Amino acid sequence: MGYLETFATDPGTLGTPENPRPHGFLFLAKAGKDIWNSWRADHPTQRDASSGEWLRAVRWHRETPQEHIQLANHPDLNFSGFVFGDGADFTAQQFSEGMGVANFVGARFGDDARFDSTAFRVGVSFRGASFGNNASFANIVVYSDKLLPITADWICFENAKFGDNAGIYPLQCHWGHGIDRMPNVSFKGVRFGNGTRLYLFSSAPFRFLDFSGATFGKETDFSESFLKGMASFHGSQFGKNTSFANAQFGNVDFQQCRFGDSVDFQGQDFGLVSFAEAVFEGRAGFSNRTFKAHTNFSKARFGKVPFISRLQAAPGYRIRGGFICLRPGRHRKWSTRISNAQAGDEHSSGNTRRAVFLSARDAGRTGGTLV
C-alpha cells in the first residue's frame, strides 16, 4: 500500500499527505527511506507568507499531548538517507539505548533544522548529512550508555555540510568507559558557512577530537570550548574573524591550517601544539596564553605581526616583554629574543614591530620551534 492509500484510511490521526500530523510522519518514517523520500518529493516544504512558518515541515509534537511522538519508543527507526526539507524539528527528543547509535547518515535537511535539547543515549551519526542555514543544536547531550567499539561512530559529523549561522552550543559529551576506549569524536571534512557557533563540552578529555580538513566561513566562534585531550584541525581552513578565545586546549594540531584576516587565541593554556606550515593572512592574537609543552611554528607564515601580550612560558623559559621573536638556539630549538616593546603594548615602534615580523618570517623560512 502506498502512502496515499494509508493516509486515506485515517486522516484524523495521520493527517493528509499535504499536511501530515505527527502520527503521519511516524508512519512515513517506519515505511522507510524510499516511501518517505517519494512523499517529500511530491510535497516539498514551503514558507507560509503570512506566518513565516514552514508548511509540511517535520514536527513530532502538536498541540495535544496525545499527538506527541516520542522517538525513544520506536527503536527500529533509521533516518539515514532521508530528505527532511526545511524546518525539521527534533526538539527535546530522546534517542533511547534500545535505538543504539541514532543514524542520520547522508540525511538532507533544509533551512532551520532544530535538534535543541535533544539527548542521544548511545551516540549519533550525521556522517555526510547536509543542512541549510540556521541549523540549531542547542543544549544537545550525547551519552555512552553502551560501550561502543573504538572504531564506531559515537559522535560523528564527518563530511557533513552546513549553511550559514549553524549553532552547536553546547554539545555535551559524556563518556563513562575510560579515555582509552573512547571512539573518535569526528568533524573530519565538515564544511560550515558563515557565522558558526561551536561550543563543545566533555566530562573527560577527548581521546581524539578530529576537525582535520574542515572548512569554516567567516565569524566562526569556538570561544570557551572544551578541547582538551588530543584535538586535530590539521589542514583546516578558516575565514576571517575566527575566535578560539578562552578555549581550553590540551594537545592540538593546527598544522597546515589557513586562517583568514584575524584569529583570536587569547587566554588559558596550550599543551603540545603545532602551527607548522600554517598561514595567518591577518593578525593572529595569542594574548595571555601559556605554552606548556613543545610548541612548533616551523614554516608558519604571518601576513601581519602576531600580537602576543602578557605571554607566559612553561617553567624554565623566560619571556620578559609583550612581543616575542624567534631565532635559532641550540639543539635546533628556538629561544626567545625580547623586544623593547612594553608588555601588552600593541602600539610599539615601527622598528620593533618590523624586527618581530622579520624574525617570525625568518623562522618560517628556515624552520624551527618555540618551546
Image (spheres, rainbow, N blue to C red):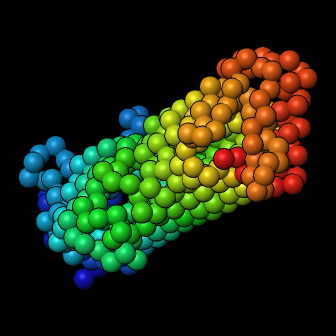
Residue visible at 75% across and 43% down?
335
Residue visible at 33% across and 78% down?
149
Asked if one can make out residue 11 in the rendered structure from this viewpoint, the answer is no
Looking at this view, is 10 or 184 the one in front?
A: 184
Rendered location of residue 93, percent (x, y): 23, 54
Question: In this rendering, is residue 227 above or below 197?
Answer: below
Looking at this view, is 340 or 59 the one in front?
A: 340
Please give left or right for residue 130 compared with residue 346 in the image.
Answer: left
Looking at this view, is 107 or 311 the one in front?
A: 311
Residue visible at 42% across and 71% down?
105
Residue visible at 32% across and 44% down?
139
Question: In this rendering, is residue 297 above or below 245?
Answer: below
Please give left or right for residue 264 compared with residue 298 in the image.
Answer: left
Rendered location of residue 197, percent (x, y): 49, 41
In which quadrant of the rendered image does the N terminus lie?
A: bottom left
Rendered location of residue 68, percent (x, y): 15, 53
